[in-house]
Image (cartoon, coloured by chain):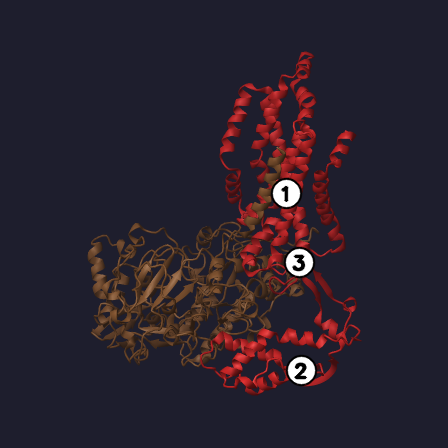
Chain colours: A brown, B red
């Protein structure tokens, strides 16, 4: 007994110490964009197929392989030919089907504002640094006809699929037709605004906007954005797919599409549950002088599938990751303390370019939160500087640097509203006295002397929620809760699992207890800040189900709706600015939701152990390459600038 | 009784275990008297400030009395802190890269090195073959080197309408006495990811965790004792029934039941007390088994049979004739229950299933947040190691007390 007790106590002490060394269980922090459909079960057909050799079209040019040839599935890729990523791919790849939005194939398929174009390509690519769309598959700038009703563009003569056939206008038109026919999410999103996309001749595409009663496009911004956010998919392959699925149309989206044709510089090399590797197509059309004039530098793009952020961080520190798209807390320690060759886009805080606005929404159906005074008091009392310094470890601009509005911190958006006109409405936070006064003036006071205020005889008590494991958001919610305590409103935090959380917040009516909750709002894109404003304030999203757009709290204001609806139809920049200024005023007065921090579109931290010449502020590129991990939109240009540190 | 206590306190192991426990309890009660700060107050703007004495920079230059000290090594230390040997070597690398002949560079001679640096360093120059991170390093180094050899110190100035007006000067010989600086905060264990004082939080968390242990231990022991007594003494179908449930629960690892129950209670309902009750309700099975076994061996003793013959009620027999004989065992089981409940809380919290965060800190929650913010990877030991030490100390002391009590009460082990 005595012996066993001693042994037992030693075992317990040891197990505690060992327990402390265990990796955290829930680590992926809030990613700026999380696909709702991410992480489905891997279908059997999509199971990692280890190809014995590389498919002929993907095979490296034989002249380039004097030494042992790398085969798909090899655990070791030549380090000096491989660019490693982290923070994009969580879980194994499900498929390669560009029509589907549930491939869980983050590196290859992400049709978004800055579409990921390593494998599939869009006619234009968006550059968030200057807000312009640059031609990729298209030849020449994006221009509307004089009536402003349609866009005509040509396909570059050099543009080819990986099977060597040319990319044609037919491919563009057929892609759109298929989106409509099979009612994909991209088709559904574009249908209200795009009448049709047609091929005039093999090289010319006409995009016709849907017109309103006044003969003007319903929304020209969305039509234009379609061309830089949706892939062109090969007609021949689509027909193969249609033949394969036959009458079972639902398989159109679930087909894993291992045989898909692509026009981009990289294709599938290998994928299993531990990593995904893309190999350069050395016959890529973009090496033509009409596009890049050369091939991108890395031969392989590889993404090890890390268990969590902590594992990813360790790999970045060790130089096993070159480009990191994940939240690394205290990123400056990498170079200040550890002397590692790691850097971010900006050398000083906020280290990246803030593009999206993680936002706390109020559930306006909850008694108490239907009162503007309560909402504004909570928003006033929150200590945003602490959120930014502690939760975001200074990887966000502060609200003194970039006063709150509906705009992200990029200069283009900031110029869209009159700063002086809304100055009195903007708050920088931690204004406890102001918040208390607001509540006192509204008659919301503590009547029973328990230190907590009552409204209509009921104690003000709310829950603040965000998904479990999204550490920076969780910490932000803790700060919101602390603010409540200071002004006599009881706020407690609650962190449900993401699977539960996402179903609740996107489906009205919200479950009881979802009082104050965090969601993201739109980042940078060709339709911004209009889309973000619409998503935050427009009543068309209020009290709806399956709502992934925004306005999760159920805010309705006809005046705001009218201003938002009007903007796409205005040509006069001054009038647009006036509308935005008015909207910012309404937003800051009614406080249906409030921004907690600014967040980069993508985190962009690079390790220069192997590769160098990554984009950074003032790197001399013209147009400037955005810090979007060398994969998204115009940032793909960065892949062509990379060089080896020790060639 | 007195003799028993005496013999208990004579035991070295018991004294050690008891001493640790008393020390922890004293900390819990005395520390807040001296440091009355709220344990969850966020004081740090930034994460994981290292342990140390924090002196207000403003107060030390503008409020505290100035003393002049001529310390021989002051300048050398100042230089070393701004310009280490590695920095000097790196400066040489840069100077070589921009084409300065090696014989002109002497990294020992600070003045010459700095002069050469000032002449050759160009922040706008993109040195060929030098990575961006390195160029940034030189830019930061260059910023540090400004006025490094300045013997004039720093000038304090106030800005009014864009015009600077000198208000004071900080000389190299100026010193302040920390005791005379108006705002000083000692953070013996630094701050955590929220910018909270770790030691203050830790003391409070230790108290809360002990409370959780106490509540959970009492519940588990109470249930285990009652069921064990009934099952052992009454026997028959009641015994079968109780043993049926006990055996059922025994084959399922209690941590799994614990996780399932905690998960099903929404986090907003999960206070420390709720967690304690849940832990208590899932950890009584072994106590039941052991108590039952002891009771069965006592059931047919002569004094019990005598009581029965005298017509005492079952309840009275259990309380008067059986309970005293197993009391020592129950006390020991209780102590073990407390320590395992504290461990259970820690394991639950690490999984994110512990009490909700805002109200009070617990040892498990502190570890949970330290891990979420990667303290173990970033080397911020003060955020998690002291917590581990406290948990280890609590369980260690309780186990020591337990073994020494066992030695005294259990005749088979008595030396």
Question: What residue is shown at x 68% (from left), y 63% (from top)?
Answer: B52
Who is closer to the viewer here, B355 or A554? B355
Q: Is residue B304 above or below residue A447?
A: above
Mark on residue B395?
1
Name the quadrant of the C terminus of chain B. top right
A328 over B229 or under it: above or below: below
Q: Kindly identify which numbered label has been placed on residue B189.
A: 3
Report the chain holding disc 2. B
Q: Chain of mark 1?
A: B
Q: Residue tagged by mark 2?
A: B149
Give neighbour class at mark 1: few <14, some 14-19, many 20+ (Cα, 10 Å).
many
Figure quadrant of the N terminus of chain B: top right
Disc 2 packing (10 Å; few <14; some 14–19; many ≥20):
some
> Is A496 positioned to the left or the right of B323 in the image?
left
- Give the SS element for disc 2: loop
The answer to which quarter of the image holds residue A576 is: bottom left
- Is A428 displayed left or right of B310 in the figure? left
Q: Residue lying farthest top? A: B309
Label 3–label 1 contact, CB within 8 A? no
Q: CA distance from mark 2 to mark 3?
A: 35 Å
Of label 2 and label 1, which has the lower sequence position?
2
View extreme (front): residue? B103
Q: Quadrant of residue B80?
A: bottom right
Quick one: label 3, few (<14), some, or many (20+) residues within 10 Å? many
- Distance CA(mark 2)–CA(mark 1): 55 Å
Q: Secondary structure at mark 1?
A: helix
Q: CA distance from mark 3 to mark 1?
A: 22 Å
Res. B400 in view: yes
Kindly indicate whether the residue at mark 1 contacts the one at mark 2 (C-beta within 8 angstroms).
Answer: no
Q: Which mark is residue B347?
A: none
Hey, which quadrant is residue B272 in on the image? top right
Residue A416, horizontal then vertical, whole percent: 48, 76
């Amino acid at each position: 007994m005595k012996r066993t007790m001693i042994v037992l106590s030693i075992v317990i002490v040891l197990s505690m110490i060992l327990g402390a060394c265990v990796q955290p269980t829930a680590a992926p922090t809030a990613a700026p964009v999380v696909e709702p459909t991410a992480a489905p079960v891997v279908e059997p057909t999509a199971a990692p197929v280890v190809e014995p050799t590389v498919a002929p079209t993907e095979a490296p040019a034989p002249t380039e392989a004097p030494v042992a040839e790398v085969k798909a599935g090899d655990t070791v890729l030549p380090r000096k030919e491989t660019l490693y990523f982290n923070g994009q791919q969580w879980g194994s790849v499900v498929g390669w089907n560009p029509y589907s939005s549930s491939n869980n194939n983050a590196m290859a398929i992400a049709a978004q504002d800055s579409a990921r174009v390593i494998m599939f390509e869009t006619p234009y690519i968006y550059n968030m640094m200057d807000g312009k769309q640059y031609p990729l598959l298209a030849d020449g700038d994006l221009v509307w006809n004089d009536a402003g009703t349609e866009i005509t563009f040509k396909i570059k003569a050099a543009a080819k699929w990986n099977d060597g056939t040319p990319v044609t206008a037919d491919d563009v038109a057929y892609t759109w037709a298929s989106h409509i026919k099979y009612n994909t999410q991209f088709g559904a999103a574009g249908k209200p605004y795009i009448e049709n996309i047609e091929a005039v001749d093999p090289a010319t595409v006409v995009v016709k906007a849907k017109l309103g009663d006044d003969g003007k496009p319903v929304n020209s911004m969305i039509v234009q954005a379609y061309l830089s956010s949706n892939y062109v998919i090969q007609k021949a392959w689509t027909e193969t797919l249609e033949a394969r699925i036959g009458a079972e149309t639902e398989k159109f989206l679930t087909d894993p599409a291992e045989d898909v044709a692509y026009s981009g510089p990289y294709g599938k090399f290998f994928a299993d549950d531990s990593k995904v590797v893309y190999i350069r197509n050395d016959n890529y059309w973009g090496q033509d002088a009409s596009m890049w004039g050369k091939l991108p530098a890395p031969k392989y793009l590889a993404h090890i599938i890390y268990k969590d952020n902590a594992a990813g961080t360790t790999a970045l520190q060790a130089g096993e990751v070159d480009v990191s798209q994940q939240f690394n807390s205290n990123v400056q320690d990498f170079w200040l303390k550890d002397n590692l060759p790691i850097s971010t886009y900006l050398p000083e805080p906020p280290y990246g370019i803030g593009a999206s606005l993680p936002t706390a929404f109020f559930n306006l159906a909850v008694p108490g939160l239907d009162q503007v005074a309560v909402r504004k008091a909570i928003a006033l009392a929150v200590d945003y500087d602490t959120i930014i310094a502690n939760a975001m470890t200074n990887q966000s601009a502060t609200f003194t640097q970039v006063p709150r509005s509906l705009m992200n911190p990029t200069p283009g958006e900031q110029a869209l509203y009159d700063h002086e006109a809304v100055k009195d409405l903007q708050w920088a936070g931690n204004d406890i006295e102001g918040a208390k006064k607001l509540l006192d003036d509204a008659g919301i006071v503590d009547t029973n002397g328990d230190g907590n205020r009552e409204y209509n005889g009921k104690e003000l008590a709310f829950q603040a929620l965000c998904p479990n494991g999204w550490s920076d958001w969780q910490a932000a919610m803790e700060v919101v809760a602390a603010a409540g305590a200071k002004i006599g409103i009881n706020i407690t935090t609650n962190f449900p699992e993401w699977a539960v959380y996402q179903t609740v917040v996107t489906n009205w009516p919200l479950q009881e207890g979802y009082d104050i909750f965090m969601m993201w709002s739109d980042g940078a894109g060709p339709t911004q800040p209009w889309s973000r404003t619409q998503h935050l304030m427009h009543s068309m999203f209020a009290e709806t189900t399956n709502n992934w757009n925004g306005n999760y709290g159920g805010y309705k204001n006809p005046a705001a709706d009218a201003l938002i609806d009007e903007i796409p139809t205005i040509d006069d920049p001054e009038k647009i600015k006036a509308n935005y200024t008015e909207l910012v005023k309404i937003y800051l007065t009614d406080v249906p939701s409030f921004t907690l921090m600014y967040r980069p579109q993508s985190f962009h931290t690079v390790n220069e152990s192997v590769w160098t010449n990554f984009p950074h502020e003032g790197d001399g590129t013209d147009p400037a390459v955005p810090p979007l991990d060398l994969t998204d939109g115009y940032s793909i240009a960065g892949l062509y600038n990379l060089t080896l540190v020790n060639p | 009784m007195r003799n028993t206590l005496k013999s208990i306190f004579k035991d070295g192991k018991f004294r050690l275990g008891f001493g640790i426990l008393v020390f922890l309890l004293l900390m819990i009660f005395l520390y807040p008297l001296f440091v009355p700060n709220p344990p969850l107050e966020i004081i740090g703007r930034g994460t994981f400030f290292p342990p140390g004495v924090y002196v207000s920079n403003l107060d030390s230059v503008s409020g505290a009395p100035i003393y002049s000290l001529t310390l021989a090594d002051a300048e050398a230390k100042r230089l070393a802190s701004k310009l280490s040997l590695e920095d000097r070597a790196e400066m040489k690398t840069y100077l070589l890269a921009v084409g300065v002949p090696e014989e002109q560079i002497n990294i020992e001679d600070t003045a010459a090195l700095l002069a050469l640096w000032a002449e050759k360093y160009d922040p706008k120059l993109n040195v060929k073959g030098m990575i961006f991170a390195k160029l940034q390093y030189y830019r930061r180094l260059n910023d540090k080197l400004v006025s490094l050899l300045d013997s004039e110190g720093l000038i304090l100035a106030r800005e009014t309408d864009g015009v600077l007006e000198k208000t004071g000067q900080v000389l190299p010989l100026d010193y302040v006495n920390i005791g005379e600086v108006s705002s000083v905060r000692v953070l013996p264990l630094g701050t955590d990811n929220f910018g909270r004082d770790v030691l203050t939080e830790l003391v409070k968390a230790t108290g809360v965790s002990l409370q959780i242990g106490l509540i959970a231990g009492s519940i588990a022991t109470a249930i285990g004792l009652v069921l064990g007594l009934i099952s052992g003494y009454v026997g028959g179908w009641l015994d079968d029934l109780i043993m049926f449930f006990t055996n059922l629960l025994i084959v399922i690892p209690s941590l799994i039941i614990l996780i399932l129950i905690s998960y099903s209670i929404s986090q907003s309902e999960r206070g420390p007390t709720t967690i304690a009750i849940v832990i208590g309700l899932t950890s009584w099975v072994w106590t039941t088994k052991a108590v039952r076994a002891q009771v069965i061996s006592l059931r047919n003793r002569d004094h019990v049979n005598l009581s029965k013959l005298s017509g005492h009620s079952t309840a009275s027999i259990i309380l008067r004739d059986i309970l005293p004989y197993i009391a020592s065992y129950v006390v020991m089981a209780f102590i073990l229950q407390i320590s395992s409940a504290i461990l259970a809380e820690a394991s639950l919290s690490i999984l994110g299933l512990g009490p909700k965060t805002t109200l009070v800190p617990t040892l498990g929650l502190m570890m949970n947040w330290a891990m979420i913010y990667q303290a173990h990877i970033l080397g911020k030991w003060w955020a998690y190691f002291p917590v581990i030490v406290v948990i280890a100390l609590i369980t260690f002391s309780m186990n020591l007390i337990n073994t020494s009590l066992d030695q005294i009460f259990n005749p088979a082990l008595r030396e």
